[in-house]
Image (cartoon, helix red, strand yellow):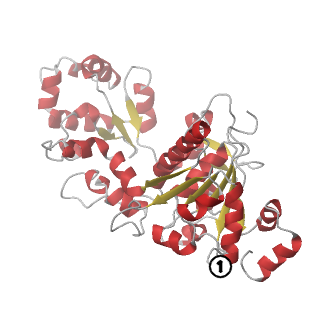
Amino acid sequence: MEGGIFEGLKVLDCASFIAAPAAATVLSDFGAEVIKIEPPGTGDPYRNLPKLPGYPISPHNFAWLLESRNKRSLALDLSKPEGRAVLYRLAAEADVFITNFPPGVRKRLGITYEDIKPKNARLIYASFTGYGEKGAEADKPGFDSNAFWARSGLMDLVRADENTTPARSIPGMGDHPCAMAFYGAIVTALYKRERTGEGSHVSSNLMANGVWSAGVLAQAKLCGAQFQERRTRERALNAVTNHYRCKDGRWLILSLLNEERQWPALTRCLGREDLTNDPRFSTKADRHARSLELIAIFDQIFATRDLAEWRKALDGNGLVFGVVGILDDIPGDAQMLENEVLVPFEDSTMLTINSPIWVDGSQKVKPKRPPEIGEHSEEILREAGYDETAIRNLKASGTVA
């Protein structure tokens, strides 16, 4: 399908920070027409994320490039009745409306599902929140750092042990997985519409996705499981599912779950075949019983070569391991490039990160640069049936920019 699976699908992106608009980005990757609705003047506050202290310094607005590719911008003041009237007209012809305004804000602006549904019975109304749409925290602002990462238990669970501080998340770390869940909700509703002809209200939230991400251990807690002591890397219970530092300071992680079969291959690749039948480590039970001793031996071994050397030594021997990647690796990662994890912007050599799903027989659109504030306002209004006089009046009143 040359234009993409969602060619002709009209999406209104009335959201910010990050999961909800990122779901719209995925729809756009598959050909949907996405209109970004943002306030006149300042635009979407997310445009300013890279200006916050501690963020990388770049001549490019990297956050906006990623989340807003392929979209057109309509600068619209939803606090004005005239602005809501424009939105209602657009919603009447749209397929999907996406927002992450808290329920109370939606009500105040007149953009709840109940407000918009009468305009278009086939519309998929998709709302995203920090903590869900019900209960005392429904209107509580949430970011992935607090609602996804901290609230779910993930922030606590990834600590090396109980004595280290909770681990900080990185920007968007929870938002992007949440965007895929939200995208799934939207596509599910579109499938329902294909069967019934009716639109739906779908929702997702950061807190729910965080607990889902922590689901294995969270379910254990729900089952009343008895948890063991959290142990540092040096005191791990299994040396062959642990990470090790190489000579150049880089790390790799072993993930040998079939260790009875893989143990001889590992010792051979490490140049320590003497360990294969060493009575201290000859059986799986022995290796686990003496894991601290074996970890110390592995630490010494891995410290003798650089990461690149170890990759060559371990690859192709049926051993499951991974590189602890760093950002410097990504631009030149041949596997990512070959599999279109990284793709260039249209008419540019600059790479961007692809959405992580592919459908055979349907090409994604080539990523287009994101819009300036209100870059397409007049164009969108004309398409919606506004004449030149009406457009001038909307601009003169400050409703549209």
> Where's residue 77, x and y in %?
66, 75
Q: Quadrant of the N terminus?
A: top right
From this viewpoint, is residue 75 visible? no
- The answer to whether residue 387 is left or right of residue 24 is right
- Spot the residue most to the right: 388
- The answer to whether residue 322 is left or right of residue 46 is left
* Disc 1 packing (10 Å; few <14; some 14–19; many ≥20): few
> Where's residue 157, x and y in %?
26, 51
Q: Nearer the viewer, residue 384 or 297?
A: 384
> Where's residue 373, x and y in %?
71, 69
- The residue drawn where x is 73% and y is 74% is 400
Q: Nearer the viewer, residue 84 or 27?
A: 84
Residue with the mark numbered 1: 80
Given the image, on which type of amino acid does mark 1 rest?
Lys
- The residue drawn where x is 31% and y is 53% is 154
Looking at the image, residue 36 lies above or below residue 234: below
- The residue drawn where x is 21% and y is 42% is 220
